[in-house]
Image: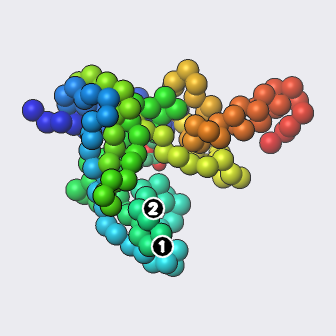
Amino acid sequence: MSKFVRKKSGINNWGLFAGQDFKKGDKVIEYKGKKYTHKQVEEDDQFDNSKAIYLFTLNKKTVLDGDTKSNTAKYINHTCDPNCEVDIIKGKIWIIATQDIKKGDELSYDYGFGYDKDFRQFPCKCGSKNCCGYIVRDDQRWRINRKFAKTKQGRLKK
Ligand SMILES: C[S@@+](CC[C@H](N)C(=O)[O-])C[C@H]1O[C@@H](n2cnc3c(N)ncnc32)[C@H](O)[C@@H]1O
Ligand SMILES: [Zn+2]
């Protein structure tokens, strides 16, 4: 029995699903990748916007590029109501269960994107009740909600 199953997801293309039950606090899967320095990532054109989504800052020196074949965790989608979170433990990136997860559930975590001028580049299709419509991290979603509340009243056009 496999711990994970890669399947088509209702959120976006592929998703990663639990192949067994997980308990809250379990280390579900390691997010693996190739290590680069921040300088290499800034200077190398291969790390454009489409690739940036796979980059994780490990520490002041190192960035991990998860867009590799061996990194099964790269299929985990973002949701605004996730069942996992990301934690760095002893220099490794782990996806940790934040609640009990049943076999067959889609795994997800908050991608942690900040609210900035480019938020429209990443519409969120997670479908959860508290989805703000964009992939923006939990503590900044209120900015999106406020912006669109104003739009409805006709005060803000964009
Ligand atoms: C790390 S990949 C996740 C796996 C991806 N679904 C795939 O098939 O390769 C990140 C990409 O998945 C998509 N994605 C992840 N979460 C999403 C969401 N909640 N809503 C819409 N697209 C999402 C975005 O296109 C994002 O660039
Ligand atoms: Zn969402």
**Disc 1: which residue:** 38
The residue at the point 71 percent across, 31 percent down is 145
Residue 123 visible in the current orientation: no
Few, some or many C-alpha atoms within 10 Å of disc 2 (few <14, some 14-19, many ≥20)?
some
Left or right relative to 108: residue 124:
right
Q: Three-letter amino acid code at disc 2?
A: Thr
Q: Quarter-wise, where is residue 70 in the image?
A: bottom left
Q: Give the residue furthest to the left.
A: 1
- Give the total of numbered labels: 2
**Disc 2: which residue:** 57
Left or right relative to 59: residue 42:
right
Quadrant in which the N terminus appears? top left
Residue 61 visible in the current orientation: yes
Give the image location of residue 49, x and y in percent. Answer: 53, 60
The residue at the point 43 percent across, 58 percent down is 56
Closer to the camera in the image, 26 or 74: 26
